[in-house]
Amino acid sequence: MIQDKTGRELAQCLERLRLIFGSYKAAGLKDWTYRHETPRDEVQPAPACQTGEQLARINDELTGCTRCGLHRGRTNLVFGEGSAKSGLVFVGEVPGFEEDQQGRPFVGRAGKLLDKMILAIGFERQEVYICNVVKCRPPDNRTPEPNEAAACSPFLFRQIEALGPKVICALGLSAAQTLLGNRHPMFQLRGKVHLWRGIPLICTYHPAYLLRSPSQKAAAWQDLKEVIRLLRA
Ligand code: SF4
């Protein structure tokens, strides 16, 4: 009798799991993982199914956003893309022309260089998550004004919390300053491990800057090596 009951419960559990996995598949979640990690101070990694739902919710909230003036020049909102599979999130500054046209982050010349940087640290582009501080392209790709960054950054912060990465890499001064909430120059921000809500954060040069100043690529590589070390820690 007891064995029958246990068997029925086991069958119910298996059926439930089958339905859950079926829903992941239907949602296009192919790389969900269950993580065993030491709890961090504040941000806890979420199972990928929850991550996908949370990101979709944040994206929905930004649909048609007019919270700052940047919406006026927008062709497409550039939310961000990728996966939390690697544990790595790159945060850039603003979408450029190509990004605005395609609605995807880092798809222009700077994006090609970022792809190479990602490959150099052993990942495919789709294995990391890439986003920007603001989701709409500023005129002439200028740095976002403080009020624009303030309007959009809460959504970035929620994105990062939903992803629960192991390491954040800030690309460029604006991203670094927004995440760290200070106005320090890049030479003070590079070369050390910061924390964003308990998550290690490395600051490095924006790929667009590296295209203009290739002599700084060696320094950026040092930053990326620190990213690798933290990911493996
Ligand atoms: Fe909204 Fe951000 Fe675009 Fe401003 S930049 S309009 S806050 S989505």
Image (cartoon, rainbow, N blue to C red):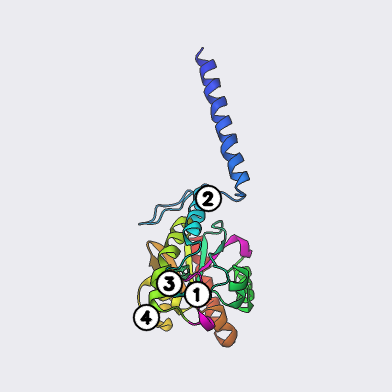
Residue matched to label 2: 48
C-alpha gap between disc 4 and disc 1 = 30 Å
C-alpha gap between disc 4 and disc 2 = 34 Å
**Quick one: label 4 or label 2, which is nearer the N terminus?**
2
Closer-to-camera residue (23/165)? 23
Residue 125 to residue 32: above or below: below
Q: Is disc 3's CB within 8 Å of ligand 1?
A: yes
| Residues shaded magenta | 124-142
Residue matched to label 1: 72
Closer-to-camera residue (141/213)? 141
Q: Secondary structure at mark 2?
A: helix
Residue 120 part of the magenta segment:
no
Q: Secondary structure at mark 1?
A: helix
Q: Amino acid at mark 1?
A: Arg
Q: Secondary structure at mark 3?
A: loop
Q: Residue 89 bears which disc, if any?
A: none
How far across and down, in percent of the image, does residue 204 sit?
Answer: 49, 76
How crowded is the residue under tag 1: few (<14 C-alpha within 10 Å), some, or many (20+)?
A: few
**Quick one: label 1 or label 2, which is nearer the N terminus?**
2
**Quick one: label 3 or label 2, which is nearer the N terminus?**
2
